[in-house]
Structures are given as structure tokens and as C-alpha cells.
Amino acid sequence: MDQLNETSSRSHSGVPWLALDVLMLIASILLYVFGGIAGSLLMIFAAIFLSVAVTVVSISFFMVQPNQGAVLMFFGDYRGTDTKPGLRIANPLYVSKKVSLRVRNFTTQTSKVNDARGNPIEIAAVVVWRVIDTARAVFGVDNFTSYVHTQSESAVRQLARSYPYDAFEETDVTTLIGATSEVNAHLLVELQERADDAGVEILEARITDLAYAPEIAEAMLRRQQAAAIVAARKEIVNGAVLMVRDAVRGLEEGDNGEQTIPLDADRKATFASNLMTVIASDSPTNPVVNVGTLNR
């Protein structure tokens, strides 16, 4: 089936025709009056003709608001779209259907769906759109507003199934919560592909609500906290290792080669163990003072 695209209509500005319509109305009234007084059938017939002309012109007018399109049909056949604002005039047998070209937005319902790893999540998005082809909006789908809403709900669900909510320690995985720009761009492309049939342009699509479903939210929160604690402890241990290494080197090298404190392997191990305990411990340490010799 061939796709119907928007074309310009053969309509004109209605202001000059409105002035002509008023003049014809005045003329018909005067002809009726003077024709009746003079008993002239010609003047009365002229008045009747002008009255019919006034009626035909009057029913040919239609209004177009800014950012609005009037789809014109002639016995069901598409005859073009008029998007010029103001008073317009066209064939009196044309039927016009108004379509708003203004920017619209709505928020999808919060949906519960499983992500790419099977975890139930709740997700919603805001969609900003407008009609750019009135012919496809009117004739391509049954109800373009309902069509956009339904397809948006479907696209958001499909998006949630395509990515995991979080990847935790996997840094090379695209996630819903970690790569919002990429995910929103994917949603925009997916929605635009679906909306083309309705002559709609998707201006923006963004995820607004994103969370684990209540039944697993507490467990996932504990997992996130555990992962954060592990990552923090790893950083602390790495920093402690560098500090111990610098401390041992400083003792052995001294100050410009003077006041050096040589340490054998056992002393290095003991020193490193004690210093690592002090640095990496979660609680304050209690030092033990050795009042004997180094060998005791």
C-alpha cells in the first residue's frame, strides 16, 4: 500500500472574499427592497442570485490557527493541507479536519518489566513530539495520539529488556542507570521508527523513573552497598601498599645516604605487617611498645 504524504492545498486568503461577501449581501438586500418597490422581477432574481452566492461563499470559509493544519477532503479524497494561519477559503464542498502542529509531551505509565538479566524493574519515560505530516497523521493510522502513546509504552518496555539495570563490577557493559545518554538515544531512535507511519517527529525521549521493583529493591541495595565497600577497601589497600613501600625505602635510604636503617627480610615483613594493620584497619589500633632490643 502506497504511503500518503502531505501536499499543499489550493486554498486562498479569505479576507478579500469576506469583503466581497459583505458587499454582495448588501447588494442583495437593496435589490430585494428596490425590486419590491418597483415591481421588477429582474432585480428580485438578481437579489436571489446574490443571496445564493453569499451563502456559497460563506460556507467556503474556514479558520486556521498558528501551528495548525487543515486537512481538506473532497468526498473522501485527500486534496491537500492548508497550514497558513488566518481566515481561509476553499471549495465549499471540501471538508476540513484540523490537526494541531504544536509540540506535545506526555509521561508514560510506570511499567514493571524484567531487564536484560531478568531482574524486575520499574521504568517510565517522558516523550516530546509533534505532527510533521498531517496526511499520514489523519490517514496513516486510526488515531495518531493514541498510536504515539501506545507505541511509546511498547518502546520503553522493549528498551528495558535490552539493557541490564546495573552491571556492578562489569565496566564494559551498557546499563540503564550508567549510560543514560546512550540509552535515551536508543529510545529516541526506536520511537522515531515506530512514529513515522503516523507522520510524527519525536523531539525528545528521556527515562524519568527507573528503580528496582519493590520485591528485590532491598536485596539489590545490599548488593550495591557490598560492592561499594569492596571497591573502597581495594582503594585503601592499594594506597596502604604504596605507603608501606615508600616507608621501607625511606628507612633504608635515609636522608641523603645518612642515618640509614637497614632492615632484613624478616624485619621488613614485620614492619610492613604492622604498618598495614594501622593504615587499613577499620578501628583505631593500640600500639605495643617494645622496650627491649630489636631481637626481643
Image (cartoon, rainbow, N blue to C red):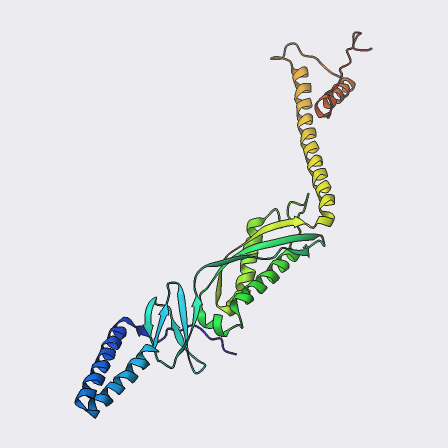
**In the picture, residue 251 is in which quadrant?**
top right
Which sits in the foreground, 127 or 165? 127
- Whether residue 126 is visible, yes or no, is yes
Closer-to-camera residue (33/164): 33
Residue 175 in sight here: no
Q: For this view, does 133 lie left or right of residue 142? A: left
**Side (left or right) of 236 relative to 31:** right
Compared to 227, does 190 lie above or below?
below
Hey, which residue is sitting farthest front in the picture? 37
- The x, y position of residue 155, in whole percent, is 60, 61
Along the horizontal axis of the image, is 164 left or right of 128? right
Frontmost residue, 177 versus 233: 177
* Residue drawn 70% across the image and 38% down it: 225
- The single residue placed furthest to the top in the displayed view is 292
Q: Position of residue 295 (x, y in %)?
A: 81, 11
| 205 shown above or below 31 | above
Rendered residue at 70%/39% (across/down)? 227
Point out the image quarter for the C terminus: top right
Q: How many marks on residues?
A: 0
Q: Where does residue 61 sit, x and y in percent of width and height?
A: 34, 74
Q: Which residue is drawn at 66% across and 57% down?
A: 161
Q: Picture coordinates of residue 252 (x, y %)? A: 68, 16
Residue found at the very far right of the displayed protein: 296
Q: Quadrant of residue 87?
A: bottom left
